[in-house]
Image: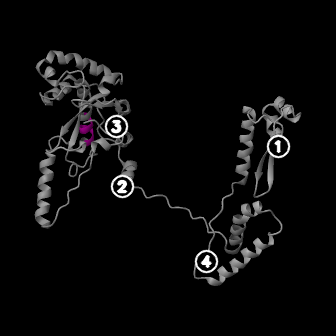
Amino acid sequence: MVIDYYLKDIHPDKASACQDNTMSVPQYTLIDHSSRASLFLWGCNITDPLVIVSLGLIVLKWLVARMVYKGVISFPPASSGKQCEDLDSKIVLKIDSLREKSTLEHKLATFGDIVYKTCLDTFGAKQHQTKCPPQRSRRQLEMDTLPAPRIKFDSKPPTLQEVIAVVNKARAKSAPGPIGVPYLLYKKCPNVLMKPHKILRSAWKNIKISKEWMTAEGVYIPKQQDLKGIIQFRPISLLIVEGKIFFSVMASRLTKYLTENGYINTSVQKGGIPGVSGCLEHATMIWEAIQRVKSDVVWLDLANAYGSVSHEMIQLALRMYHVPEVIQVMLDDYFSGFHMRSSTNSYTTNWINLGLGIAM
């Protein structure tokens, strides 16, 4: 198999030039030691891109031709001494028969093949076992059987009443976002609130998420005294108020949609459910359990729960619960473009894309 064969299919002029040996270069040989076959490159410029591509094709076809799956040998138990003794004699006999018939290089290249083939002829190969598919989890089964919602998600743009409810619920002393406008302004100036409401409605209709809403200034709040490391601080993301109002309306509608359709088991999930004091109810249940068992109690807490949520998992959950595509698109745009930086009194980091987790 020579390179001229490939060159004729690619570039006839180059092929004839090689055949005429007008390109004077040394001969190059690729040797297959186990079969003692050779590939010769005669009179071709080895630096020519066309020759390099052709050489690559030769090597690729050569390797593919030699790729043979070797099954796992069905060896007998280690205690079967007689069978192993017979195998030992067979292998030695085959190797000795080639002692005078090949070069040292060929012996080194074919030794493993001889041993393998002798073992395979003697004991055979194990039957290929088909692996059982992995068992589906309870959550995966639920995803396939989750019923369609009885009550549809409200996909209409935010109403003024919803925007006012978000503003009234927010703390007056809540820190402002990067542009410096706090909730307090909208609490004290209801006529001004009418203006961003119109903008938010237009953004919802056009499925447009502002880049400013995807920008957060991070600050660190101490969680305990005697601070010694960064893990003793809790990061807080300062976001633009208008974006917080927009997504608060969306979150409120999501909660209503999930609870009304029975997608959330409120006997287990307490946090984030309107009208349910999750901390108080859970603390009471835990205290009653402690009184009954009269034993040690182990407290488990997820480290960095909000900061470790996968954005792909959020999209999967939205699809699983039949949330309208328009909501999925807006949330995907928001998380995919979200970036933040953190500051101290003496240092500010570069902007970092938040590829994982939810800003808090």
Residue 210 percent across, percent down from the top left = 33, 23
For the residue marked with disc 3, what is the amino acid? Val
Name the residue carrying label 2.
138
- Which numbered mark, 4 or 3, is in the foreground of this view? 4
Tell me where the magenta segment starts and ends, as one range. Answer: 253-258
Amino acid type indicated by mark 1: Val
Residue placed furthest toward the right: 20
Residue 26: quarter of image: top right
Magenta span: chief secondary structure: helix
Please identify, in this view, whether the residue under mark 1 or under mark 2 is nearer the observer.
Answer: 1
Residue, disc 3: 323
| Neighbours of disc 2 within 10 Å: few (<14), some (14-19), many (20+) | few
Q: Which of the two labelled residues, at mark 3 and mark 2, occupies the earlier sequence position?
A: 2
Q: Which mark is residue 69?
A: none
Q: Position of residue 345 (x, y in %)?
A: 21, 29
Q: CA distance from mark 1 to mark 2?
A: 59 Å
Task: Name the residue beneath numbered marker 4.
Answer: 76
Q: Which sits earlier in the primary sequence, circle 2 or circle 4?
A: 4
